[in-house]
Each structure stands twice: as structure tokens, then as C-alpha cells.
Image (cartoon, rainbow, N blue to C red):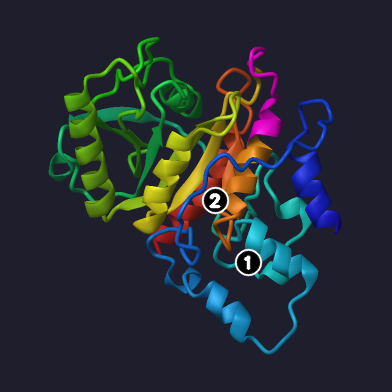
Amino acid sequence: MLLRNRLLFRNLTSFLPSPSPPPKSASFTLSFNKTIAYSTHKLPESKPQVAASRATKQPMSERARFAKTVLFVPPGVDPEDVTDEMILPGSNIVLGPYAGHSQIKEVEFVKSSGRAMDCPKDNRPEFAILGRSNVGKSSLINVLVRKKEVALTSKKPGKTQLINHFLVNKSWYIVDLPGYGFAKASDTARTDWSSFTKGYFLNRESLVAVLLLIDASVPPQKIDLDCANWLGRNNIPMTFVFTKCDKMKASKGRRPDENIRDFQELIRENYKQHPPWIMTSSVTGLGRDELLLHLSQLRNYWDQ
């Protein structure tokens, strides 16, 4: 039980006071496909893991069972071999042998595209950043690359209206996508943006994974879970990136760790294998290096 306790309690509260257990949220339900695997497009062996675990004749240890259902175990790691030290702080992500160079040395803006077919065609691996329009997408990009105003930041929701490609280390892309759920955009704009964003997801073969940003300073939002639902049903690999983990909305009376726990409870109700998740803050830099390590092991395996 040491592994379970350290993940659920130490990692979530490493920078916050010890919380009281939150009540289980049941305000709405989802219809996820429970057999969907969350990995990169080039991880075919990950999809049958649930069936394989049922078919095996060898009894599975509690540690391995926990690792396969709650942790994100990357290629090259046996769930039986997972230790506390292999789990990245503030996440459920296990560090494996494909993790490599993760530091960003240079980044350049390449282009903005209004259609998926207009995106760069050099087949370099890419990670798309998606989330509600005020979740802190641009701030996270700026923190990751450690360069001010690489991504356009604004106090007005819906500022990003195109698919924006940023080339990192001349080898892979960060893709900034339009935010969803922005209240001040017209209904026509919402429909158009949603349409071409979905077209990008469904037709982009070089997409390694989507970083779905979730605001940890507020309780779970139905619109975020609806987005995760759509990605899940279409087998789009994703990582939940919890933002604003340094904040607490006084009016809500909830700490980030409590909101994250509620969100995870909703996810666990619908998934046999929990997607990878990580806590971040664009103010303190929390989770930056760990997220880059996670991206490096997904990218390096995708390149094989």
C-alpha cells in the first residue's frame, strides 16, 4: 500500500496543507468507452492491456494492479517493477527508459493555420495544447519554453483563433489550439473553431498526444469532461494537465488538490486505465520539468 498512499496523498499535497477527504462528486455522468487506452498513436500494444490482464494465468500483485489502473505506465516498464521513485512528483506518470533529453533550447513560431490541411507537413511529432479559453494555455507554453510572449496571452477569452505551430529544438512541435467555452465569442465563431479543431485531431497523423488543460482552482467543469469524452471516444491520446495549482478561489472555498481529487474520481468511474495527469503552475513553475520529461518519453517512443 505504500505506493498507493504516496501517490494519492504525498504527491497531491506536496505544496499544500493536508486536506480533508472531499465528498464524491456525482453531479453529472459521462459515457466514456471504458476500453480506450491512453498512450501515443504508435503504442498498439497498449490497447489490449485490459484484455491481456484478464487472460493472464499468473496472479497479479496489488502493486501491479494499482499501477495498471491508476498510474500511467509507459512502454518499456513492467507494472510489477514500478517503485515510488519512478513516479514523477505531482502526477501519476511513471518515468521509463524512453525518457531522454527534455530541455528546450530554442523555439520558433512557424505558422498559424485556419484548417488542418494547412498545418506543417514535415511529419515532426507534435503535442497539442487544448483547454477552456481562460485555463492558462498561453501562460503554460511560455513557462515551458521560458520565453516571454512566445504564445499570445490576453485577458480576453478566445484570443487564439487559429492552429498555431511552434517548432521546438528544430525537432518537434507545440501546437496552441483555440480555447473552448469562451463566453464572448459569437455562436458562428464557436461552431467554426470547434469544427476545424476536431478536424485537426481526426486527421493529424503526427499528433503524439493532446495536453488537455484543467483549471485546478475551480471544481470539475462539465465542459472539460465533455471534451475529454469526445477525445476518448475518438481514441485521441491525452494527458490531463492541471493548471493554477498555486491558487484557490476564495468564493469557491476549495483548494486545488480537492478539485483535482474530485476530477479524478469522475474519471475513475469511467476508465479502467487512468489517463496520465500532472499538476502545474505558470506562476511557480510547478511541474514544468516533469511535464517535459513526460513529453520526451512519449516523443522518443513515437520516433522509434
Q: Is residue 255 visible?
A: yes
Number of the label disc, if any, that sits on residue 111: none
Pointer 2 residue: 100
**219 and 160: which one is in front?**
219
Q: Amino acid at mark 1?
A: Val
Locate residue 140 relative to residue 167 in the image: left or right: right
Q: Within 10 Å of the Cα at label 1, are there few (<14), some (14-19), or many (20+) other Cα atoms?
A: some
Residue 91 location in percent, x, y? Answer: 65, 44
Q: Is residue 102 visible?
A: no
**144 and 282: which one is in front?**
282
Quarter of the figure with the N terminus: bottom right
Q: Amino acid at mark 2?
A: Gly
Toward the top, the furthest residue is 155
Start-end of magenta stretch: 249-259
Element class at badge 2: loop
Q: Is residue 54 above or below residue 12?
A: below
Q: Is residue 235 magenta?
A: no
Pointer 1 residue: 77
User: Cα distance, mark 1 to mark 2?
Assistant: 15 Å
* Label 1 with label 2: CB-CB less than 8 Å: no
Q: Is residue 52 above or below residue 94?
A: below
**196 and 6: which one is in front?**
196
Q: Is residue 253 above or below residue 288?
A: above
Locate residue 114 relative to residue 151 in the image: left or right: left
At x 44%, y 46%, the residue is 228
Residue 229 location in percent, x, y? Answer: 42, 49
